[in-house]
Image (cartoon, grey):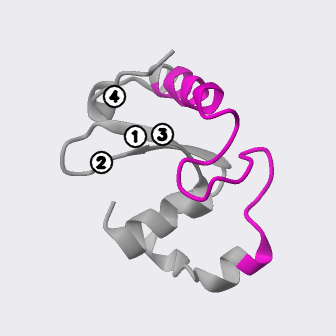
């Protein structure tokens, strides 16, 4: 099944959760960004190579280990990523 990107801004919390889980399944449980298993944290070596200034993110950003990544300009969903990778995408790639 190929998931059609959806407008993140128009999805309810439960719709976002369902879509995130669909992406996880379609991605065979791997992070869209780093390609590693979403069931494990990114490695310490990966984190060391990609430092994150956590002051840029709201409290609770890491409460959910898997995020539904979306394009901030178009609102369209892209895939499921580690929370850490979502931060990297924002800081280093403007996504």
Q: Which mark is residue 71?
A: 2
First in residue order: circle 2 vs circle 3: 2
Q: CA distance from mark 4 to mark 2?
A: 10 Å
Between discs 3 and 4, the one toward the N terminus = 4
Say if mark 3 contacts mark 1, CB within 8 Å. Answer: yes
Label 3: few (<14), some or many (≥20) within 10 Å?
Answer: many
Label number found at residue 7: none
- Residue 60 forms part of the magenta stretch: no
Kindly identify which residue carries mark 3.
Answer: 79
Where residue 2 appears, as percent x and y from the top left, is: 45, 20
Dot 4: what SS? Answer: loop
Residue under the image location 40 percent in, 75 percent down: 92
- Near mark 2 (Cα within 10 A), the count class, few <14, some 14-19 or many ≥20, is some
Mark 4 or mark 2, earlier in chain: 4
Identify the magenta region: 16-45
Is residue 84 shown to the viewer in this render?
Answer: yes
Disc 2 from disc 3: Cα separation: 10 Å
What is the CA distance from the residue labelled 3 to the residue labelled 1?
Answer: 4 Å
Q: Is residue 26 above or below residue 58?
A: above
Q: Which residue is mark 1?
A: 78
């Amino acid at each position: 099944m190929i998931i059609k990107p959806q407008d993140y801004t128009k999805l309810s919390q439960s719709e976002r959760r369902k879509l995130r889980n669909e992406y996880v399944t379609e991605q065979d449980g791997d992070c869209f960004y780093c390609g590693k298993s979403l069931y494990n944290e990114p490695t310490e070596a990966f984190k060391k190579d990609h430092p994150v200034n956590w002051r840029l993110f709201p409290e609770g950003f890491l409460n959910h280990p898997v995020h539904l990544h979306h394009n901030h300009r178009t609102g369209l969903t892209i895939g499921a990523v580690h929370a850490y990778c979502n931060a990297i995408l924002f800081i280093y790639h403007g996504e």
